[in-house]
Structure formats: structure tokens, C-alpha cells
Image (spheres, rainbow, N blue to C red):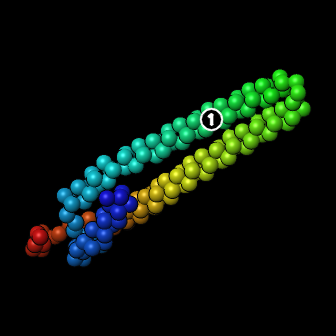
């Protein structure tokens, strides 16, 4: 289950909890809430590891793109040098070599742009996930603080105890 869904479930449990009479407090199943929080705690590091893996993948893609671009440029320069060494076609070989290098550089830039776009999209998606998670956590904490500010209900000694469910 998605960590955001877990947070939404916790909020739903608290919102649907029975109210304590004469109080703004509510009764929740402690085990259920603690269990859900433990599951959330267990899932969040996984999401963080996924983001680190995504960044590592981005770096690998960038490195591969750079190596490929360098290889293409090197091949273009070698082809250019080979064509220049032939006397009969010296002029045309210079033009052809420059064209190959230009194509190689354009291809290298295209690869860099594609990788940057992919990584930017992946990071934007992860940023959006983290933003939603933080907003849900903040709402939960705000509700918890509001309940804490209200205080706990302490029955008078004359009152009968509330039934336990």
C-alpha cells in the first residue's frame, strides 16, 4: 500500500473514532493506529531508497550518454583525420569530417536533453509524492496537536466508568 494511502487510513480512523462524552477527545484502537504507523515507518525508507536508486540510475544514464557522445565525437574526429589524409579529396573530407563531428555533437546533445528530461520528470513525480506525503503528515500532526490542546477527559470519582468496546 502506498504510504499516502496509509496516512489517509490513519486520518480516517481518527476522524471516524467515537467521541468521548463531554470532551473533544475520541477513542481509537491504539493497536490499530500503532500498527498502521509502524507499517508507514517501514514503507517510507523504501520510497527514499527508490529515489536514491532513481538518482543513481540518472547518473548512470548521464555517464553512458557522455561516453557514447565522446565515442561518437572520437569516431567523427578519426574519420575526419582519415579523410583529410587522402590528397584527392582533402577539401571534401574536411567538410565531411566537420559534418560528422557536428552530427555527433548534435546527437550527444540530444541524448543529454533526453536524459535530463527523463530525470526531471522522474524527480518531479517523486517531489509530488513527497509533497503529498508531507501534507498528509502535517494534517495528521495538526489534528493530533489540536486534540492534545483540548486535554484529556478525567472522570469524577462519582461518575460511572465508560463501557469499554
Determine the residue positioned at 24% across, 74% down: 19
- Answer with the quarter of the image where residue 78 lies: top right
32 over 103 or under it: above or below: below
66 to the left or right of 145: right
Q: Secondary structure at mark 1?
A: helix
The answer, for residue 157, to whether it is visible in the render is: yes
- Check the picture and name the quadrant holding the N terminus: bottom left
23 over 121 or under it: above or below: below
- The residue lying toward the viewer, choosing from 144 and 68, is 68
Where residue 121 appears, as percent x and y from the top left, is: 56, 54
68 to the left or right of 6: right
Where residue 25 appears, as percent x and y from the top left, is: 27, 69
Instruction: Find the residue positioned furthest to the bottom.
Output: 22
- The residue lying toward the viewer, choosing from 146 and 133, is 133
- Check the picture and name the quadrant holding the C terminus: bottom left
- Answer with the quarter of the image where residue 23 lies: bottom left
Task: Please count the marks in the image.
Answer: 1
151 over 43 or under it: above or below: below
Where residue 40 appears, as percent x and y from the top left, is: 32, 53
Number of residues whose C-alpha sits closer than 10 Å to that of mark 1, classed few (under 14), some (14–19) or many (20 or more) = some
Determine the residue positioned at 27% across, 68% down: 13
The answer, for residue 147, to whether it is visible in the render is: no
Question: Which residue, given by chain and number where applicable, does mark 1 sit on?
Answer: 68
164 to the left or right of 20: left
78 over 43 or under it: above or below: above
Determine the residue positioned at 45% across, 41% down: 53
Where residue 106 appears, as percent x and y from the top left, is: 73, 43
Determine the residue positioned at 57% across, 36% down: 64
Instruction: Find the residue positioned furthest to the front.
Output: 88
Amino acid at each position: 500500500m502506498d504510504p499516502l494511502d496509509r496516512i489517509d487510513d490513519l486520518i480516517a480512523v481518527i476522524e471516524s473514532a467515537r467521541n468521548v462524552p463531554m470532551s473533544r477527545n475520541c477513542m481509537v484502537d491504539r493497536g490499530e493506529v500503532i500498527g498502521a504507523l509502524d507499517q508507514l515507518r517501514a514503507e517510507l525508507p523504501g520510497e527514499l531508497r527508490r529515489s536514491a536508486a532513481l538518482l543513481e540510475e540518472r547518473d548512470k544514464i548521464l555517464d553512458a550518454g557522455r561516453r557514447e557522445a565522446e565515442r561518437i565525437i572520437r569516431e567523427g574526429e578519426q574519420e575526419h583525420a582519415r579523410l583529410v589524409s587522402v590528397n584527392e579529396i582533402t577539401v571534401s573530407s574536411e567538410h565531411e569530417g566537420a559534418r560528422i563531428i557536428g552530427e555527433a555533437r548534435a546527437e550527444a546533445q540530444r541524448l543529454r536533453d533526453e536524459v535530463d528530461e527523463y530525470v526531471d520528470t522522474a524527480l518531479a513525480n517523486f517531489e509530488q509524492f513527497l509533497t503529498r506525503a508531507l501534507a498528509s503528515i502535517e494534517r495528521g500532526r495538526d489534528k493530533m496537536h489540536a486534540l492534545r490542546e483540548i486535554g484529556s477527559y478525567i472522570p469524577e470519582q462519582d461518575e460511572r466508568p465508560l463501557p469499554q468496546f
